[in-house]
Amino acid sequence: MDQAPERGGLRRFLRRLASSNAELEAEELKKDTGAEGATPIAQCGERRRAQVAGTLRTVTLRPRGGAPALEAELYDGSDVVSLVWLGRRRIAGIEPGRRLRAEGLVSLQDGRKVIFNPRYELRGTT
């Protein structure tokens, strides 16, 4: 009798048991990102258009140059990108824990990846 499927299942079970919640979340997000046809954030290059997908970790109001700016941190399991909507104080549906897909020009600001005024599509909650 072949025991290979049993061993594979046992290996996965033990791996999940030994992994932290953060590692498991990252693994799930990476799968979801690939399924949505998005580019992993870790592979996004500066000054290139990219479509990314993930979960919003934080949403904050951070004025820039005296004007309001809504900033959200998007995490996909590989890296983080800041999504910044200039001139906005609030956007319905943009809240921590929300899944979304965003598209725009990736730039670097203070060593962090940023997309200003991205096009976005709300996906659901995690």
Image (cartoon, rainbow, N blue to C red):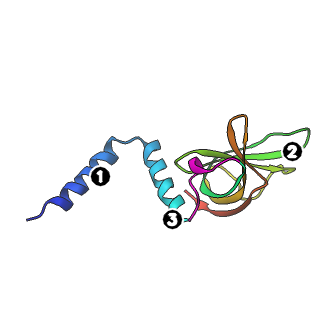
Q: Which residues are magenta?
A: 37-46
Residue 18 image point, x, y percent = 32, 41
| Sooner in the amino-acid sequence: mark 3 or mark 2 | 3
Say which residue appears at 72% left-offset and 34% top-offset.
110
Determine which residue is flagged by label 2. Answer: 68
In this rendering, the count of numbered labels is 3
| Sooner in the amino-acid sequence: mark 1 or mark 2 | 1
Tell me: 60 left or right of 75.
right
Q: For residue 64, which quarter of the picture?
A: top right
Tell me the element at label 2: loop
| Sooner in the amino-acid sequence: mark 3 or mark 1 | 1
Residue 92 image point, x, y percent = 75, 58
Q: Main secondary structure of the magenta part?
A: loop
The amino acid marked with disc number 3 is Ala
The amino acid marked with disc number 1 is Arg
Distance CA(mark 3)–CA(mark 2)? 34 Å
Q: Nearer the viewer, mark 3 or mark 1?
A: 3
Determine which residue is flagged by label 1. Answer: 12
Say which residue appears at 75% left-offset and 57% top-offset.
118
Quadrant, the N terminus: bottom left
Determine which residue is flagged by label 3. Answer: 35
Q: Nearer the viewer, mark 3 or mark 2?
A: 3
Tell me the element at label 1: helix
